[in-house]
Image (spheres, rainbow, N blue to C red):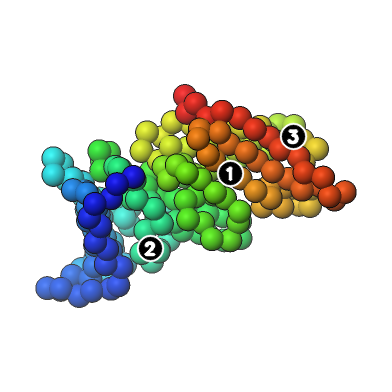
Amino acid sequence: MNLEKTETKTKLIKNNDTIFWLDTISNDKFLKIYSKPENDWQNLTAEFGNKNQNHRIDLKAKEYEILGIPFTNQIEWITEKSFALINGCGTNCRYVLIFNTESEKPIITPIEYYPGIKYVNYKTDNPNLYVAVEQNNDESLSLIIIDTDSQKTQKVNLPKHWNRGIGQIYGIVDEIEIKNTKIKIIQYQENGLKEEVDEILTQN
């Protein structure tokens, strides 16, 4: 991605009786999240769009309750069309809020791995991709690779014998690497051997 101009303010900035939680511009697209203290400092409004269109939504609406108020004002990654914010709702519960400037409403979806994640071994040369997890009927897990802007997905099934511990993804997968449209998923066995699942990403 060639992000020629990115300006981000993520502090609570009071301006003309408005508290800006987030004010970001990147390559002709923008995202602002703010509140009016005289009404309710928790009643957040989001404005986002580009030079051709502008969207405004109330983040205190019921459909966004899972995010909680207040939620993070840190943008985790930026793509050609989108801004992505991460928030948690408890242990092993994490959601991404994606503002696509071409969509009227943001997307909220569970997430496990994303560009720039710090505490797990996830490497990608495609900053558009994030990863969710799906539980299968046979109690095995699958990774769902998702393109941020298009929301195209691809499922990668993990071997059932990889299940260990309490069955959570970070105890099952040790490394994920996406490079040149290929994904490599690694688990290190107790005997010291390494097992891999390798697939080509097609994003159909």
Type of amino acid under label 2: Gln
Can residue 116 be seen at all in this image of the molecule? Answer: yes
> Does 162 sit left or right of 87 as displayed?
right
> Does 35 sit left or right of 190 as displayed?
left
Q: CA distance from mark 3 to mark 2?
A: 35 Å
Dot 2: few (<14), some (14–19), or many (≥20) neighbours within 10 Å? some
Q: CA distance from mark 1 to mark 2?
A: 24 Å
Type of amino acid under label 1: Glu
Q: Which residue is mark 3?
A: 159
Q: Which residue is mark 2?
A: 74
Dot 3: few (<14), some (14–19), or many (≥20) neighbours within 10 Å? few
Depth check: 71 or 25 in front?
25
Query: Of helix, strand and loop, which one carries label 1?
Result: strand
Query: In this figure, what is the number of numbered marks?
Result: 3
| Dot placed on the residue nearer the N-terminal end, 1 or 2 | 2
| Quadrant in which the N terminus is drawn | top left
Which mark is in front, 1 or 2? 1
Q: CA distance from mark 1 to mark 3?
A: 17 Å
Q: Which residue is mark 1?
A: 177
Depth check: 121 or 66 in front?
121
Can residue 38 be seen at all in this image of the molecule? Answer: no
Which mark is in front, 1 or 3? 1
| Pointers 1 and 2 in contact (C-beta within 8 Å) | no
Query: Of helix, strand and loop, which one carries label 2?
Result: loop
- Which residue is farthest front? 180
| Dot placed on the residue nearer the N-terminal end, 3 or 2 | 2
Q: Answer above or below: position of 64 versus 145.
A: below
| Dot placed on the residue nearer the N-terminal end, 1 or 3 | 3
> Does 93 sit left or right of 125 as displayed?
right
Q: Answer above or below: position of 152 versus 46.
A: above
